[in-house]
Image: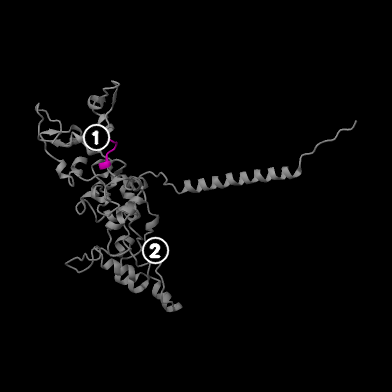
Amino acid sequence: MSTRTVRPDSGCVRFSCGRNRLAVLLILLLLLLAAAACSRLPQSRPLLPVAEYERMIVGRLDADYVGTDNCVSACHAHDRITDFFRRSVHGEQIRPETGLPLVNCETCHGPGSLAIAKVEQTKKSAGVQNARCDTSKLLDLKHLPPQAQSLICLRCHSAASTPSLSFWNASVHALNDLSCSSCHNLHEGPQQKVSHEKMAELCYGCHPDVKAQFSLFSHHPVRERKMGCFDCHEAHGSAQPRMLKGASQRDLCTRCHMEKSGPFVYEHGDVTETCAACHAAHGSVNRRMLAAAMPFLCLQCHGPAHSGTVSAATGVKALFSNRCTDCHSAIHGTDTPDSRGYGTLRK
């Protein structure tokens, strides 16, 4: 009796091999994408002494300062940027005794004699009218460490001129490798500060979670352009947590909400410390930007003395469904006692 060997279908084998190859290629592609994403993440670098950063921004020692006018006359490619600069707050600063500007292009880019040395020669020999200066002879600002980039600005913007910058080196932004040029673009136009219209979008680039909070039902009117991030936060650094302005978090909030500041005869204990105990600063799904809905917000600190009512039919204590502020309407504080002489935060 003869036996017949059953051979697997060659088509199925080819299909299986093709599917395996596709899976391997997909895995390799994902690994390459992951490696590329990791390479763009900020890299950990040790902080150097300030003297090392100062050496980086000195510029070429064999170059001389020639002034902005000489640079522009030799190379007209930056005429538009020069016009912006002259009409800016930096370009308007003139030293009274000499008439020379306190700030010019070489203040940030370093001495420029070597950068323009071959421009005129190129124009004459090659007949090129728009010859560009040799930027490799200037400071390579884009590849300097963030600390060195900021130090260029801090040479003038010291604590004497901008007090908030005294906190910069220890601020969250500086410790996360941001520099002044991360937010300020001095070549964009004569307005060299971040405009109120662009401020929120600038901050959202790093804080997308905050942008989402401002889209919630109850929020501060940043989205409506009635407020800006800088109204509450000091981006250059602060002595307060989260870079808040003011002497305290409550002091900041009462700048706009003065009717909540008191002093009151009967005060709400948590309100005297921080408003964030009850309110979500950027936005909330609850009315009045409350961190939780009432009565659950109040029950986090207060016992369930008023949290239920007894049903006459069943005798079961049910959850009290009204808001606490329906009775305690002066929740931030009051000067009016009740009939027993206690302050129950009622009007």
Looking at the image, the residue that sits furthest to the right is 1
Q: Which residue is drawn at 25% across and 31% down?
A: 298
- Where residue 276 appears, x then y in whole percent? 25, 38
Q: Residue at x 23, y 52 (%)?
A: 158
Query: In the picture, residue 338 is in which quadrant?
Result: top left
Q: Name the residue under label 1.
A: 323
- Where residue 54 appears, x then y in whole percent? 31, 53
Q: Residue at x 35, y 73 (%)?
A: 74
Q: Quadrant of the N terminus?
A: top right
Query: In the picture, residue 279 is in which quadrant?
Result: top left
Looking at the image, the residue that sits furthest to the top is 315
Say which element carries label 1: loop
**What amino acid does circle 2 point to?**
Lys
Front residue (pair 57, 221): 221
Q: Does the magenta-highlighted stretch encompass residue 214?
A: no
Residue 214 in sight in this render:
yes
Q: Which residue is drawn at 42% across and 45% down?
A: 43
**What amino acid does circle 1 point to?**
Arg
Q: Distance between the residues labelled 2 and 1?
A: 69 Å
Query: In the picture, residue 63 is in which quadrant?
Result: bottom left
Q: Badge 2: how crowded within 10 Å, few (<14), some, or many (20+)? A: some
Q: Residue 240 carries which label?
A: none
Front residue (pair 21, 185): 21
Q: Name the residue under label 2.
A: 137
Q: Which numbered disc, 2 or 1, marks the residue closer to the eye?
A: 1
Say which element carries label 2: helix
Is 337 placed left or right of 31 in the picture?
left
Q: Range of the magenta residues?
A: 287-294
Residue 75 in sight in this render:
no
- Where residue 59 appears, x then y in whole percent? 34, 59
Q: Quadrant of the C terminus?
A: top left
